Image (tube, rainbow, N blue to C red):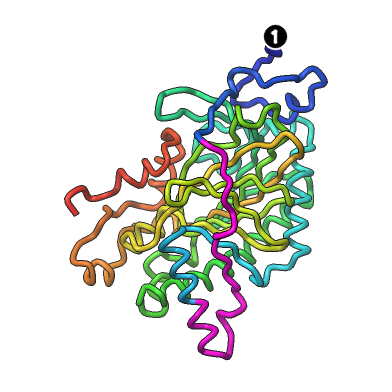
Amino acid sequence: MAEPSSNISDNSFVKALAESSTLESIPSQFTFANDSRGSHSDSIPIIDFSLLTSPDPDQRAKLLQDLDKACREWGFFVLVNHGIPETLMKSIIDVSLEYFELPEEDKRRYKAKSPSDPIKSGSGSVITTANHKIHLWRDFVKSYVHPEFHCPDKPQILRDIVYEFSKKTRSLLRKLLWAIGENLGLEEGYIDEALKLDSCFQVYSANFYPPCPPPDQATGIPGHTDHGLLTFLIHNGDAGLQIQHDGEWFNTNSPQNSILVNTADHLEIFSNGRYKSVIHRAVENNQATRISVLMANGAAPDAIVGPANPLVERDGHPLYRPMKFIEYVETMLSNKVDGKGNLECLKIQDA
């Protein structure tokens, strides 16, 4: 069968290609062989956030223990009873889909000129460790929403919903980090002050993954870790996120109205290696369109992030070099997709 002709660039949109009536196979620019498809899903930790404020001290202690274990052993958990309204979660999925339905000329206004542009949209490509350029089978929009708020101006309602979701998830972030600080044996308020969380760096990102023929020959994004502390992810009911655990890929099925949370690079750094930044990827399907919405939550842009001093004193040495948060982000956005390669560059080799 002849390959469909296409003129693919980093600023093209996959949605138009996927909806083409002549598409029977993917163009070669998208070809990416995943090493294996995930088949495990039943062991992923579920954290009931409501127990953090339980009047029963045993329930709260169990919650803290479960959270600590999830961050140490998995770097990932499913958060339930988190307090963010289901209507808001549905609204941000719906309005993100509305963005992807806009005419291409509206979305091309946000073509990325540099990795640090506060609003970016497109489909994009990545350079793998083998120096191969592959196009990703997804469209995306990203905007920096804190400490300065940026957002596309269409659809008109997008700005208000993203702003509200950003505010709610920042509050959730602070509460989770208070619990994490308690688990790490840090004084109350230490994380807030050390990482300047009043000015935390927050990025809204929405992804559009259309059905892909065939799904095992393309990728939404290869295995990678995230910058920041905790990343929150929700989706439209069609799961496609996989995480790596003990060398195996796990599917991340989740209950309705839950939030998928992964620990990111700066939490691994700050905890001096106690908590692990998890490698994850987005895989395709050939049945349904998948929409995901993420909030990546980090330290303040000007915060110098290194291992927490009390933990270094306890351990006797730091495992990572400190670095200004925004410099790490910009370096990561400019580098190859390489598992945990960016984080490994900050490891102190003789530690």
Residue type at mark 1? Ala
Q: Is residue 43 magenta?
A: yes
Q: Mark 1 sits on what residue?
A: 2
Which residue is found at the position 50% from the left and 34% from the top?
A: 35
**Of residues 45 and 179, which is closer to you in this image?**
45
Image vertical order of residue 91 relative to residue 331, above or below: below
Q: Secondary structure at mark 1?
A: loop
Quadrant holding the C terminus: bottom left
Q: Is residue 175 left or right of residue 111?
A: left
Residue 164 pos. (x, y %)? 69, 62
Q: Is residue 153 left or right of residue 192?
A: right
Q: Is residue 159 magenta?
A: no
Question: What's drawn in magenta, residue-wise?
Answer: 36-63
Quadrant holding the N terminus: top right
| Figure label count | 1
Which residue is found at the position 45% from the left and 63% from the top?
A: 71
Which residue is found at the position 77% from the left and 49% from the top?
A: 95
- Residue furthest out toward the right: 21
Crowd tier of the residue under label 1, counting other residues whose Cα lies within 10 Å: few below 14, some 14–19, many 20 or above: few
Residue 75 pos. (x, y %)? 46, 58
Image vertical order of residue 139 relative to residue 312, above or below: above
Q: Is residue 200 visible?
A: yes
**Snapshot quadrant of residue 100:** top right
Residue 92 pos. (x, y %)? 73, 54
**Of residues 116 and 317, which is closer to you in this image?**
317
Which residue is found at the position 72% from the left and 47% from the top?
A: 238
